[in-house]
Image (cartoon, rainbow, N blue to C red):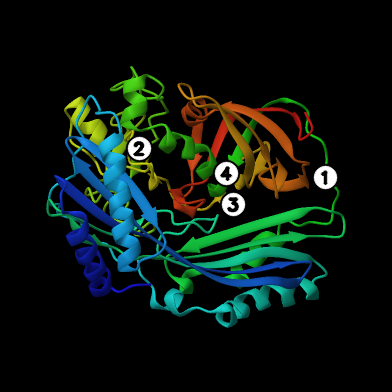
Amino acid sequence: MRSKDEAFRILGEALEVAAEGVDEAEISLLGGRLGVTRFAENEVHQAMELDRETIAIRVVKDGRAGRVETSDLSRESIEAAVRQARISAQFLPRPAEPASLPGPQSYRPVDGFDPAVDRATAVDRTAPVGRVLLEAARRRLVAAGALETRVGPVDDTYEPHGVYAIANTKGVLSYYLSTHARLSVTLHNVGGATGWAEADSYSLGDLDASSLFESAARKAVPTGPISLAPGRYTVVLEPAAVAALISFVGSTAGGSELVAGSSFLAGRMGDSVTGSSVTIVDDFSHPLHRGAPFDLEGVARKPVVLIERGIAKHAVYSRTTALREGVEPTGHLTSSALVDGTESAEHLVMQGGTGTPAELVRGTSFGVLISRLWYTRLVDKKTLSLTGLTRDGTFLIEGGELGAPVGNVRFNVGVLDVLQRVEAMSAAVRAGGAVVPGLRLDGFTITGGAAA
């Protein structure tokens, strides 16, 4: 990826071209480098490296904004993109609120770059993957999964996902290059049961392949799964399952959703929405997140308390929505269109307790351990009601110990209702893209098997 000096050189040259004949101009560099080693059936079946970078030009003329992206960073291509952006701005309808760009910003320093991730090649990824495959073969288990390394904001579809450098004619000039590594392991036994574990961090050294293998292996037990009758159960949710649930808190906490009345926060600010033990913050600077200190148009990100001790506190705002509503922006623009001011909270931190999920299990006389959720679908944004399935490690809990494995089940719950019923929490860890604890709670509604 490009160094800060090189990125600023490109931004400066492009901005000089884009600024001619318009009121305001902005140049962004998006994308990154992705390396993936995938394995299945105890064999590596894919090792790939991919670089994707685009440059985005946005110009404002007479209150209208035009935006164009190109993956060709030559001067000729940039000049052509600038012309196209000007044409777009010229012929777009004039918006009710004239478009504008942000002014100079002050950013909180964050270090989320690991040189080991930057240097990692397919050969480097082979060592931790090899440890997983050798141990799986030794124990007569079948392993599948992937080790990914990323430099810069590139997403799972291999497309540019965010801005790593940005400059505009009003004084914004920012650069933040981060790294990310993720290892997931799924183990299958001869009886068909599966166990899963995953870890991710900005640092490659934080991924412990042997520890992840053991975590997954403990759940890939040879006993056949039992069926669970529909009903309301006491459950222990491991952190990955908690992260899947509270992701809907983040995706509906935007100011535009609040104004539209479709957010769970709408009409409830200052009211109790969860149990008093629950505090959820969006904090890009948390040491387990280390996210970019600015959003897609260079506005400084701020930590935002969404729920404090059960009370609804704040929404997150893009600059566009904040200007419209007369509040301070929090740097949460996440819509690549940069048109409607779409926001979401992407660096969730839920305060936890102490101990581990295993201790939550030991404190449960009868219940169900749920390791992971999938196919979760939001039914109602206002109540955060959703449905989904369990996957890769669901077990009966009897007398504080794990009992028989349970076949995958369907559940229907409201996230806010779940958070009202929390009885105990483990310490918070990074899981599923959030920092979350494991939870023990009652009244978790299971509606039947996965086919139900």
Q: Nearer the viewer, mark 1 or mark 4?
A: 4
In the image, taking residue 269 as reference, residue 387 lies left or right, namely right
Give how far across and how far down residue 405 sits, in percent. Answer: 77, 46
Q: Is residue 72 visible?
A: yes
* Local SS, label 4: helix
Task: Please tell me which residue is depicted at 51% across the width and 28% down the height of the picture.
Answer: 421
User: What kind of residue is marked 2?
Assistant: Glu
Give how far across and how far down residue 87 sits, in percent. Answer: 29, 43
Q: Which residue is mark 3?
A: 358
Label number found at residue 241: 4
Above/below status of 298 relative to 447: below
Q: CA distance from mark 1 to mark 3?
A: 20 Å
* Local SS, label 1: loop
User: What kind of residue is marked 4?
Assistant: Ala
Q: Which residue is mark 2?
A: 343
* Local SS, label 3: helix
Task: Please tell me which residue is depicted at 38% across the width and 46% down the height of the picture.
Answer: 349
Q: CA distance from mark 2 to mark 1?
A: 42 Å
The answer to which of marks 2 and 1 sits earlier in the sequence is 1
Q: CA distance from mark 3 to mark 2?
A: 36 Å
In the image, taking residue 392 as reference, residue 428 lies left or right, namely left
Q: Residue furthest top?
A: 267
- Along the line of sight, the residue nearer the viewer: 346 or 91: 91
**Neighbour tally class for label 3: few under 14, some 14-19, many 20 plus, Cα within 10 Å:** some
The answer to which of marks 4 and 2 sits earlier in the sequence is 4
Above/below status of 90 relative to 78: above
In the image, taking residue 210 as reference, residue 270 lies left or right, namely left
Q: Which residue is mark 1?
A: 225
Q: CA distance from mark 4 to mark 2?
A: 23 Å
User: What kind of residue is marked 1?
Assistant: Pro
Q: Is residue 291 visible?
A: no
The answer to which of marks 1 and 4 sits earlier in the sequence is 1
